[in-house]
Image (spheres, grey):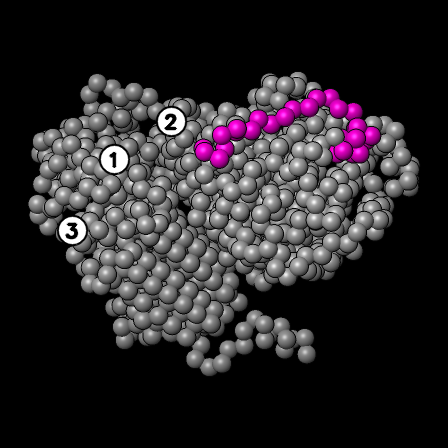
Amino acid sequence: MIDPSKIIRARREMTASHPRFERNEEDAAEGGCGVVGLACEVPVAGRHLFDSLEQMRNRGNGKGGGVAMVGLDANQFGVDESILANSYLYSVAYLNSAVRDAVEESFIHPNFHVDHVHEMPALATWKEDLPSLDTRPPDVVCYFLRPRESSLDEFVSTKLQEIIDPKDKEAATQEFVFHVTHSLNVEFYAKDGRTDAFVLSHGRDLLILKIVGYAEDVIRYYSLEDMTAHVWIGHHRYPTRGRVTHPGGAHPFGQGIDCALVHNGDFSNYVSVKDYLAQRGMEPLFFTDTEVGALAFDLHRRVYGYSMEHVIESLAPTSELDYVMLPEDKQEVYSAIQRTHIHGSPDGPWFFIIAQSEGSTHRLIGITDTSMLRPQVFAYQRGEVGIAFCGSEKQVIDAVLDSLASEDRRFWRRADQYWNARGGSYTDGGAFLFDVVRREDGSKELVMTNKFGDVVDTHPPGDYMSIFATEESPLGFSDTDPVLAYQSVLEALPHMSWPEALATIEAIEENASSAGREWSWKVLTLLLDRMYDTGSLRRSRWLDSVEASLIRTTYAARHQPCDGFIGQMAPGHRPSPTSDIQRIVVDARPYPPEGTDSLALELVALHEAGWKRFVILHCRGHRFIGNGFGPDTSNVEIDVLGAVGDYLGSGSDGMRITMHGNAQDQVAQIHKSGELVVHGDVGQCYGYGAKGGRLFVLGNAAGRPMINAVGSPKVIINGTALDYLAESFMAGDPLEGGGFVVINGMMFDQRGEMLSLETPYPGGNLFSLASGGAIYVRDPYKRLSDSQLNGGAFTEMTDLDWAVVEPLLQRNEEHFGIPLQRLLTVDGEVANPAEVYRKIIPVKSKTLHAEAAWAGHAD
């Protein structure tokens, strides 16, 4: 390893020889961004990201979009595998093509052997076909380069000033490329504000493309629809001010060798990180938070030679309870890292996604910071092919799977597992690495590890090879009550093969002709929503088949209406209901996710036309569903299927909304009354500012659920919450009609059996700054500690408390089939509620919070 001090000294000399560049106050502020990343064992074509990115346009404003690719197809660049693997793919964006000769004469040819030149195709009709583009994207030339020995030797002797070990030649080569890139960017981009050309990326088997526009426009403009890669990142930027009319400020950033980094968020300490880098000879040229993040990542990983665990720790330092829970030897190392690098650690909120090329390994990394204020979702699917994701929203992951499944039977439309990471967690670090590694036979294998290098099992049980149905179902359903029919399927399913299971689904559909569509709706929604044993069948694929059947059954109401269902024929079609019980089935796909022609506003118009019951099919990131219906909507029911967008049920005043799957961020914001039931997980800031109603979540909540809630909201989360549960909760006294939250701390295994989590609440800051309400936690083993509270205190659970909680848990059982008796069972015995649940209330007296405690300790 080359002495890092030698590299840093050389960088200082390089930047000292260049003019200084300062970011003005108005330069390049970031807003929220949208991002999706994937890693797959087989190459994925760019067209499969298109719908995903288009559905996420609200997270960008057309001022910056980009993609990164790792694990490319050599033939698509006109080179062989050896050149792709061993040459630097040096991609240069020419905003002024007239400078190309000068760039090549000044920086390319004097420093490199050119093995091949590939010019990225450009859409000639972009003005007509890409109306969202205001500026012509740059011409991009991909040079496949190897440093000239003479140039490299001169760099080592004059810049590094030492004789390097032969095994360190690769490290010297990488630093040489870094220097050439920085000098090129200074000369042709930063100096005098000329912005004529800049280097997009300079790694092996890696390419970055970015424009002033949206990321899906990158795919179209550069004809990436059929271009393949094993790792993809797509990013929408949402800059709010400053230098936003040039592609250099867009993500991804490829300043690091062999890597591309994007982020969603803001650095509140940009100047501090910039100064930290300046001390180590690095100068930002593009004036964005992401650029300094990319430089810091490369510094710690490549120059300092840190392990990936220690790189992540340097960027997202572990603190509070999570630090305390670490082994002592790890605490010692982490403490040293923090002391050394804390002023260069980006202060969030942020979420990083990084693509890396490390030899024959293609890598995707997702890192969550400890504030967890930026949305993030991870997922994987493991069938004949393994694929993993991280992104801003679940719906963008589902959009990629939907696109893949439409062309390739090896994929299906639902991931095996989705989860939100808890930044800095002592269990997994809140960061995950997805490596596509080469096997001995040349095929690829997806391996997932967490921050600590622990391998995460991505091989769920169950046969995923869904094939054709048998001719006859093993079950008959004639004249069977729908609940009994559902129970008969549950009893038989563990013993069924795929052909028998698919025949059973077909039989349920066919029985709708005699028993009615309402019968099939009841059976299929129970099969979709409840947790149970699927036997030898992969659960995610079985649910995909059930949901497809449910959609077919209800969608048929467009052409075959009945007393219970009628379908909307097209946007704007608003028939009159024949009765109060009739549902209107609305296909979400023709509607944009938001705006004046959105699905949300169409539902309001249908309600004004007399409709009270709605079934929404094929949600694809549609936002604000159930918003804007006005006061007193207790007679309204909405069922939602698909991948819903943000703000589901926000502002609801009486309606009942059922989400048949996971929901996203800001669910039930300022919810006033009614019921909102989520048969899955919820995202960030669930119930933000809620004022009332009853809210039920089958799974987990991400960061900051029920923040700033007031009045009387009553909530059950059957899983857990990541952190900051009920922050600034102001919901009165639950014994006098005020609000409260119940955390059951449960999970389900692959056979649908309910198990207690290791801890009912893993984070800290529980009830932080709360002034009213209560939290009831199922914690029979007293695993929660006072150290996890910040403004709350444990108190006695009384019979009066149970009289308030029990009715909500009974309703919870009706929604999810979670028996109240099972929740009260501990070690096989039914216990007294006061022995199972613990009550937490706000501390009435002045509480010394974390910041004050630290200041007091320092004195």
Q: Earlier in the sequence, mark 3 or mark 2?
A: 2
The residue beneath circle 1 is 551
**Which residues, given as a range, are shown in magenta?**
102-129
Q: Vertical placement of 432 versus 730: above or below? A: above
Residue at screen point 36% across, 35% down: 539
The residue beneath circle 3 is 609
Q: Which residue is at the front of the view, 124 or 340?
A: 124
Residue 824 visible in the displayed image: no
Please give the count of numbered marks on the rendered protein: 3
Q: How many residues crowd mark 3 within 10 Å: few (<14), some (14–19), many (20+)?
A: few
Mark 1 or mark 3, which is nearer to you? Answer: 3
Q: Quadrant of residue 635?
A: bottom left
Identify the secondary structure beneath mark 3.
loop
Q: Does the magenta segment cover residue 716?
A: no
Q: Quadrant of residue 50?
A: top left
Q: Which residue is at the front of the view, 345 or 748?
A: 345
Residue 791 point in image, percent of width and height: 48, 73
The residue under label 2 is which amino acid type? Ser
Residue 235 point in image, percent of width and height: 53, 42
- Say left or right for 291 vs 578: right
Q: Does the magenta segment cover residue 125?
A: yes
Mark 3 or mark 2, which is nearer to you? Answer: 3
The residue beneath circle 2 is 406
* Residue most extreme to the bottom: 845
Residue at screen point 54% across, 73% down: 849
